[in-house]
Image (cartoon, rainbow, N blue to C red):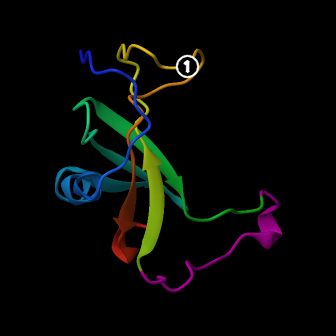
Amino acid sequence: MSHLDYLPVTDDSFATTAASTFTAKVVSAGTTELTGPCPRCGTVIRIPVVTGIYKSFRLLRRRHAPPAPDARLEPVICTCDDDHPGRPEGDVGCGAFWIFQLEPAAQ
C-alpha cells in the first residue's frame, strides 16, 4: 500500500519504466489488457485498451482480422485503489500518467 500524495504528474521515465515492466495480452478481438506496476506508486494495475469496435449484427462482423496497423500510442493513467492523500473524491490512482507504445502484435 502506497502513501504517496495524489499528484497529477508525468515524467519521461514513466513511459520507459512501463515499456519494460508492463505486459500486453489480447483478451478478445479488439481488446488488449496492459498489466504492470504503476511507475510512480508501484501498485499493479490493469488497463483495458480497445483497439477495435465490432457491430453485434452477425452479417456486419468482419470475417478476417484487418492488417496490423503500425504501433499505437495509448495514454495511460494509474488506476490503483491505494490510499493517496489529496486525491479528489471519486477519482482513482496516484495521479501518474504516461504514453504507452502498443506494438501491432499486441493489438
Q: Amino acid at mark 1?
A: Pro
On screen, 83 above or below 16?
above
| Quadrant (top left, top right, bottom left, bottom right) of the N terminus | top left
Q: Position of residue 99 (x, y in %)?
A: 40, 59
Instruction: Residue at 49% x, 25% y: name it.
Output: 92
Which class describes the residues within 10 Å of circle 1: few (<14), some (14-19), or many (20+)?
A: few
Q: Which residue is mark 1?
A: 88
Q: Is residue 35 left or right of residue 54?
A: left
Please name the residue shown 38% across and 40% down the image: 96
Q: Quadrant of the C terminus?
A: bottom left
User: Which corner quadrant of the image does residue 105 belong to?
Assistant: bottom left
Q: Looking at the picture, does residue 28 appear above or below residue 94?
A: below
Name the spot of residue 5 as percent of width and height, x first: 34, 20
The boundaries of the magenta stretch are: 56-70
- The image quarter containing residue 12 is bottom left
At x 73%, y 69%, the residue is 61
What residue is shown at x 21% (from left), y 32% (from top)? 42
Residue 69: within the magenta?
Answer: yes
- Vertical arrangement, residue 82 with respect to residue 98, above or below: above
The overriding secondary structure of the stretch rendered in magenta is loop
Depth order, front residue of 7/49? 7
Label 1: state its secondary structure.
Answer: loop
User: Position of 97 compared to 39: left or right?
Assistant: right
Q: Quadrant of residue 102?
A: bottom left
Can you give x and y, in whole percent of width and height, for residue 100 in the image? 37, 60
Residue 63 image position (x, y, % from top left): 64, 77
